[in-house]
Image (spheres, helix red, strand yellow):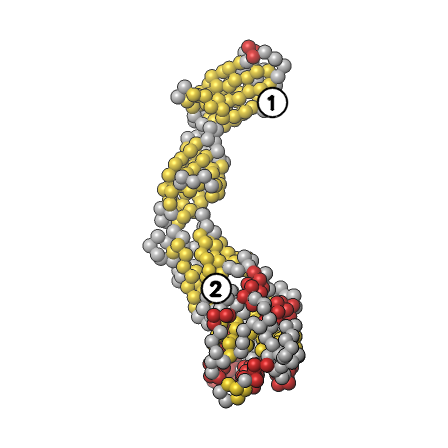
Amino acid sequence: MKKYIRSILFCLFFFVLTGGSSGQGRGQNEEKPPLTRILFVFDASQSMFARWQSDMRINIARNLLIELLDSLEHIDHTQFALRVYGHQKRFPPQDCDDSRLEVPFADNNIPNIRRRLRSITPRGTTPIAISLERAQYDFPPCDNCRNIIVLITDGIEECGGDPCAVSRELQRKGIVLRPFIIGIGRDFREDFECVGEYFDATSEVEFRQSLKVVISQAMDNTTAQINLLDINGIPSETNVPITFYDHVSGKILNNFVHTLNHRGLPDTIYSLDPLVTYTMKVHTMPPVVIDSIKVNPGKHNIIPADTPQGSLTLLVAGTPQIAYRTIIRKSGELETLTTQTFGNTEKYLVGKYDLEILSLPRIYVKDVDISQSHNTTVEVPQPGIAVIRLPSEGFAKVLLEENNELQVVHTIRENVNRETIYLQPGRYRVVYRSRASSQTTFSVERSFRIESGISTMVNLSF
């Protein structure tokens, strides 16, 4: 009986742990993992017949690649393909068109790649650039795929092409991620570092290890956290949208809102690809951009950004609040960062800012200081109301009188004879001439004073 109860409890525990079924507990809208597609570009040029340690280069490279593929045969969300160059036409003469997709991408096609590798005989030259250029067409269209090229070669470009330029263009277009290159027999780093991630395999042991590292980097799980640092270097800032771009192509890759977990630490993200170089934009005000970010595969990466913030509240004295818009600029600069509405509180990076409040007349507040985790309040006087009555339609402007100077603050519409406007406290004048009058001497002027919260009637009819 006790054994039976223990069995029931174990089943219940397993049911809860797994969510009851494979489709529950994970969320019906969980994003499907991307399909990783790895294209092996294999050198079968004549030089692969050369002796290399225990055997010919072609035999060692073929056998070790097959050994690797055997270990990957049942990996989910992964497809493989094989392009070969230098195997169709004998050298001499040189044939720089000798590159062919031998096994296209498909599910469960490793046996096909294995058979084709065993039948290849090295013959020709080394057209690396054209092989990379044609490789872009080896990847069928896909909305959720990671396209990776692994180039295995024992030599450099022999057909006058530019593998570096081709690789840069493929990455710029977002067709493939930064390629991997394994150089057999001697060090080709100087020739291939501009193409992609280069691995030097001057021995069989190094070649086997390079293959394992390449696949590990292409497929290992990688995590990261983004530390939004306050002025003391503590990752306390959060709740800010963040965008990751592909540094090479400029393509938008990821968008999310930064979060602190239940322990007050930056949450872990799983969507960063170790084969991509990123540009990160933290959408603070103003934004913070971190360039050329690389994440290490199979590790937990920490990406810091200095984002110390305080807040700004804009208020009108008294009630109700007037929805003035305010232009925000960095102190001493002309570029508009954003606009903020009175009555709201917004966050800004620590520093000084200039405010242009779109009241009548405009109010300028210089060098407003935003400090770490502190709310700065800027308050302006409550406006008064001017009700302006004209004898008839015409041309009229409201001018502010200050220090024996007049400044236009408002133009009254030409097709009305009454207008109500909010004005900041001060002395004003209205200058008016009827549309029907063609003589300057018929202009009318009225002076008036505006006080906070008080309506003032300005009548030009007498």
Q: Earlier in the sequence, mark 1 or mark 2?
A: 2
Q: Which residue is mark 2?
A: 269
Q: Is residue 430 left or right of residue 135?
A: left
> How many residues crowd around disc 2 within 10 Å: few (fewer than 14), some, or many (20 or more)?
some
For label 1, the crowd category at 10 Å Cα-Cα, with few meaning under 14, some 14 to 19 and many 20 or more, is few
Classify mark 1: helix, strand or loop: loop
Label 1 sits on what residue type? Answer: Glu
For the view shown, which residue lies furthest in the front direction? 93
Q: Residue at x 44, y 63 (%)?
A: 225
Secondary structure under the numbered disc 2 in the rendered image: loop
Query: Tag 2: residue type?
Result: Ile
Which residue in the rendered view is the most extreme toward the bottom?
A: 54
Q: As rendered, which of 203 and 302 lies closer to the eye?
A: 203
Number of numbered tags placed on the structure image: 2
Instruction: Name the residue located 52 percent from the left edge and 73 percent from the top edge.
Output: 181
Residue drawn at point x = 59 percent, y = 67 percent: 161
Tell me, yes or no, whether the two marked residues, 1 and 2, touch with CB atoms within 8 Å. no
Picture quadrant of residue 380: top left
Picture disc at residue 310: none
- Residue on which the image places disc 1: 414
* Residue 211 in picture, x, y percent from top left: 51, 78
Q: Quadrant of the C terminus?
A: top right
Where residue 365 appears, x then y in whole percent?
Answer: 40, 35
In the rendered image, residue 407, in percent from the top left (x then y), is placed at: 47, 23
Single out the residue that lies furthest toward the left.
Answer: 232
Real-space CA distance between mark 1 and mark 2, rounded to the nearest whole angstrom: 59 Å
